Image: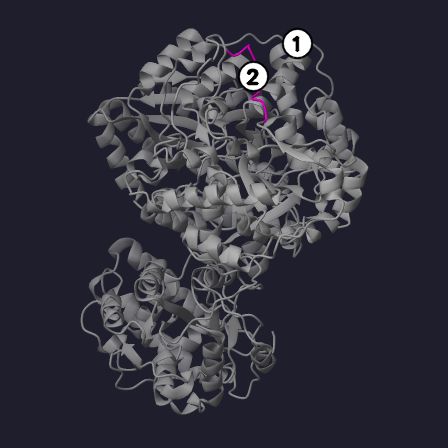
Amino acid sequence: MSAPHHRRLFTLFLSLPSLKSSPSSVLFLRRLHFLSPTSLHFATPTSFPSFFSSTRASAMPYKHRSGHAANERRYWKEKPRAASVNDVTESIDNISISEHAGGNNMGAGASGSSSAVQFGAMPDNSIAKGRPRGVWLPKTYATASELVASAAPSATALRTEKETEVSSAGSLSRLFQGQLGENFVVDNNTFSRAQIRATFYPKFENEKSDQEIRARMIDMVAQGLATVEVSLKHSGSLFMYAGHLGGAYAKNSFGNIYTAVGVFVLARMFQEAWGAAAIKKQAEFNDFLEKNRMCISMELVTAVLGDHGQRPIDDYVVVTAVTELGDGKPKFFSTPKVIAFCRMWRLPTNHVWLFSSRKSVTSFFAAYDALCEEGTATPVCQALDEIADISMPGSKNHIKVQGEILEGLVARVVSHDSSEQMNKVLKEFPPPPVDGSGHVLGPSLREVCASNRADEKQQIKALLQSAGVSMCPDQSDWFGDGVGAHSRSADKFVLSKFLQAHPADYSTIKLQEMIRLMRQKHFPAAFKCYYNLHKIDSISNDHLYYKMVIHVHSDSAFRRYQQEMRRNRGLWPLYRGFFVDIDLFKVQKDKASELAKESNDLLSNLSSSCPSKIEKDDLADDDANLMIKLKFLTYKIRTFLIRNGLSILFKDGPSAYKTYYLRQMRIWGTSASKQRELSKMLDEWAVYIRRKFGHRQLSSSTYLSEAEPFLEQYARRSPQNQALIGSAGNLVRVENFQAIIEGSRDEEGDLNPDEDSAPPSPIATNLDMVTKDEGLIVFFPGIPGCAKSALCKEILKNPGMFDDNRPVHSLMGDMIKGRYWPKVAEERKKKPYAITLADKNAPNEEVWRQIEDMCRSTKASAIPVVPESEGTDSNPFCLDALAVFIFRVLQRVNHPGNLDKSSPNAGYVLLMFYNLYNGKNRKEFESELIERFGALVKMPLLKTDRSPLPDSLRSILEEGLNLYRLHTSRHGRAEPNKGSYAKEWVQWEKRLREVLLRNSDYLNSIQHPSTAAPAIPHGIPSSCSRPALLTSENREMMGSV
């Protein structure tokens, strides 16, 4: 919706008469809130050729920089290809293993023209010529130079070396004064190069149920199409390492205490494995990763970075992925190849089981079902060892280094010949010796942290110094120029400049494509840019280096991106732990035209390629990515039910906490007997911890200091309690050595998210407005009684509010026979330019996806209108709002949908709608709507200064919600008069009406009056896909929040 349309809709809302006269619409709409992302978005076309033509048309002319041509002559040459470490022999290279879940099928597309190859076109699987037989090189990178060796000279212009480099000191000074980035102007001579620096597997959310995934896995194994691979899930944090120059990374950050701890622990692993040779091997390993552009991902398990399910006995890492980054899309090693790689470098491996027959994989799922509620590490590992076709124990024994509390198992589909390849690896790469067992290794992680308690900076410095210069010779990621320069973000326009510049190679094209899509679709992600201090000596006025962190804020982004990948099979995956090196550079005018032509040729080739030739990603294939996470109840008790419930318990009290944990257990499908046992234990925990802490909430990062002693004494009371708890009594005290984490950081070490997060879309220079030939859908994610029908009627009375000739029509859900939303889609196809008022509650993501599809197919915008409410921790609507909605519905007469005072089950229907929104708090609910549709209209509902909900109202609503849970758990969606709780429903409906009648004065008094002033923020996007720029006149009229 364009800005003028927001304005006109708002004007109508202001002019609406009081709805007090309508019993069904006590809500007054004289005050509405328009919410949108805080910054405007850069509107970019979706096709690459049009993007570049429009960019060049508006680009600034090339300006000759004074003194540059005279003093610094540039020449272009290809950077020499570094040889890899000779210690890694060809034996691992002979293991040809595909990795389905890792997406390693690089180069599946067309080779393109010669000019496309020159610009890093889609790589193929050619064997590198002239490679020594005894040297193993990652295929995707080692062949890069050979692939373009015969290309025209213009290909070499992508690698630049300057004869004269600016001094490091001068670069730092200008860098942190903001001069270089701010003065860098994108023009026709500007190019960008982007390469992935570190990443982990994409996060895939299965759209099928767990039972459907299990059945498909068994079926694929039975047909000989796949093997099921199962690995232990250690309870820690993601840590990625790309060498001392490539960098150390947490899930969404770098240069902090999390990555310093990771570097220290990894260095310690080398000391334990190599003994006296550790320093030499650390240096060789760093050199190997850098020369071959590789990254290893690990689970970092420590007791110093906050509590998970159990404080580990020792601090360690386990390698979970090895990735060849090359010059293109990352290629993940298969598990047998990971094990071979780790055994050569003596890195810790995980425990892995392979199930290659129908009998074994069926037995695996049966074993999990038998152990899921009481299983701990020892019985689980023993059971899997007995039934697996292959068991490969990890070099770090979970029981000895972490303990008995096991987070879970990860089962996924891999190549059908994985068993054969695993046997080959186990034969050729036996477990390596441990040469450091008799050596003095120096202070442990806990000792270093305990000895440096001044502040976080002191701890980081001590950890990196203890890791040693062979492991960490460069500390610039943590300390920059020595005064904390790293913490300062780069120029906020870096990303816009990156997207506007010509892409220098195929990798850059694909990353630009990904970022544009995410920003145009308003995905919940930030693109945070920092100066790349490893290249500070190479920075100049015309060549800038950055690190970009792609931080996905919500799992919904991964689900939505998967859907985009299914529509566009050439998209690169959206990875977890996503870090990109970005170079922005200029070339001389004569070279620029030649390179720009080649860039456009490559884009044209990609755009015109038929689907069969476009590089496809197996990660978009559902069967190739079948994966299921199987967690154990003994772990979930501690993390989900105790730790994650602390804020609810201390903020909302024991009743809300009970509602929370019962809902969690119902979602998990916990057996009735375990639910009873856990309810008794958790109620006792709630009384115990509130009595001890009062209103002061227990910290979630150290919750085990209180929870573990409680669980230990509870387990001692009976064998039944012991089985429920799993394991207790081995608490590790962390008070004296816990890492100091300053500022607002999440568990994975995200740096000051509020300050460092880039806006969710680029800053706009040319912003599109929605034209009058585009349609509009107004819909209502609400609950019966929210006055949506009354609002639609008032809009229909004022069809001229939009100041154009588009028809405005309303489709009332209660008057439509059959399925409602397909009917709306059908009507929109007939009149795609019309304004549709979808007068029906739209409570879930399935409906929202249908509306998004309508927007795409009929060139329309959509705007959600929701009742304003504080919400609870698990529902966007508070009980006060629910009480008002029921109260309004029971005042209706002759409602077309028969939901009025004469309906015997009106209360039940409202409870059903209320439960449809369970699972999201208010912030998550509003954020997802804004992310999907670009804006949100809030209708005022309740007074902010209202008195608390009377106990009688709260009690009758909570009683109804509990009765609804019992009814649905036993009878599903059956009518309340057809189940075993029929009498209870009749009694509850009667008492509900009596309680509402007694509190009618209160319910009328808490509703928002019609005289409130409007409050609307600046900068409202126009649609779910393209933003609009509000004029100053519109902004002034709308005001601000």
Q: Is residue 594 visible?
A: yes
Residue 834 bears which disc, if any? none
Residue 979 in picture, x, y percent from top left = 22, 61
> Quadrant of residue 668 in the image?
top left
| 50 in the magenta segment | no
Q: Which of the image's four quarters has the N terminus?
A: bottom left
Task: Please provide percent x and percent y for residue 879.
Answer: 46, 69
Residue ID for mark 2: 83
What separation in Å lies between label 1 and label 2 (alpha carbons)? 22 Å
Above or below residue 687? Residue 878 is below
Q: Is residue 573 above or below residue 1034?
A: above
Is 20 displayed left or right of 257 in the figure?
left
Residue at screen point 31% across, 76% down: 834
**Which is nearer the eye, 379 or 164?**
164
* Magenta stretch bounds: 79-88
Q: Amino acid at mark 1?
A: Ala
Q: Main secondary structure of the magenta part?
A: loop
Residue closer to the observer: 195 or 358: 195
Comparing 484 with 977, the one in front is 484
**Residue, x 27% and y 83% (percent of image)?**
895
Q: Residues within 10 Å of mark 1 (few under 14, many from 20)?
A: few
Residue 383 in the image, given as x and y percentages of width and height: 36, 22
Q: Which residue is mark 1?
A: 277
Secondary structure beneath dot 2 equals loop
Q: Secondary structure at mark 1?
A: helix
Q: Earlier in the sequence, mark 1 or mark 2?
A: 2
Local crowd size for mark 2, using a 10 Å CA cut-off: few (<14), some (14–19), many (≥20)? some
Relative to 307, say whether 293 is above or below. Answer: above
